[in-house]
Image: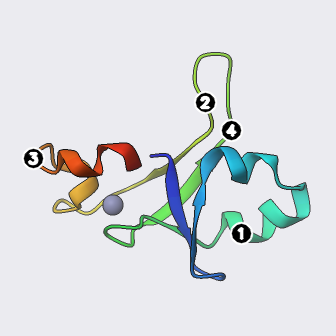
Amino acid sequence: MKRALSVMDNVDLDAVEFSRMDADWRRIRRRSLACMACGAPAFFRAASARRAASFGASHSDDCVLMSPPWSAFRFLQ
Ligand SMILES: [Zn+2]
């Protein structure tokens, strides 16, 4: 997913913005990320040659980000 909630700041972060912040800032926040929809703990995935930076999470079964009918949320995935 492209965005995740920073629990300590209570703001949602874009994965690309996150990747551009300095190492100390990221280290503090890596452990306090959550899915914006279901609140599951999330983690940051750095960019690689094949994909942009993103966040991952073990979503709950009913998380709207994981259910196809909620296409309006596709931009968040
Ligand atoms: Zn979720």
Q: Nearer the viewer, mark 3 or mark 1?
A: 3
Q: Quadrant of the C terminus?
A: top left
Asked whether disc 1 touches disc 4, contact meaning CB atoms under 8 Å apart, the reply is no
Q: Amino acid at mark 3?
A: Pro
Q: Amino acid at mark 2?
A: Ala
On the image, the x and y values in percent for residue 12 come to 55, 67
Asked whether disc 4 touches disc 2, contact meaning CB atoms under 8 Å apart, the reply is no
Identify the residue at image location x=78%, y=71%. Answer: 28
Task: Say which residue label 3 marks.
Answer: 69
Label 3 vs label 4: CA separation?
28 Å
Identify the residue at image location x=9%, y=47%. Answer: 69
Q: Which mark is residue 12?
A: none
Label 3 vs label 2: CA separation?
25 Å
Kind of element beneath mark 4: loop
On the image, the x and y values in percent for residue 23 come to 88, 55
Label 1 vs label 4: CA separation?
14 Å
Task: Say which residue label 2 marks.
Answer: 52
Identify the residue at image location x=37%, y=56%. Answer: 58
Asked whether disc 3 touches disc 1, contact meaning CB atoms under 8 Å apart, the reply is no
Return the residue nearer the eye: 21 or 38: 21
Quadrant in which residue 8 is drawn? bottom right
Q: Is mark 3 within 8 Å of ligand 1?
A: no
Task: Say which residue label 1 marks.
Answer: 29
Query: Horizontal placement of 47 versus 24: left or right?
Result: left
Q: Nearer the viewer, mark 3 or mark 4?
A: 3
Mark 3: few/some/many CA within 10 Å (<14, 14-19, 20+): few
Query: Horizontal placement of 28 versus 64: left or right?
Result: right
Return the residue nearer the eye: 75 or 66: 75
On the image, the x and y values in percent for residue 16 come to 67, 44
Task: Say which residue label 4 marks.
Answer: 46
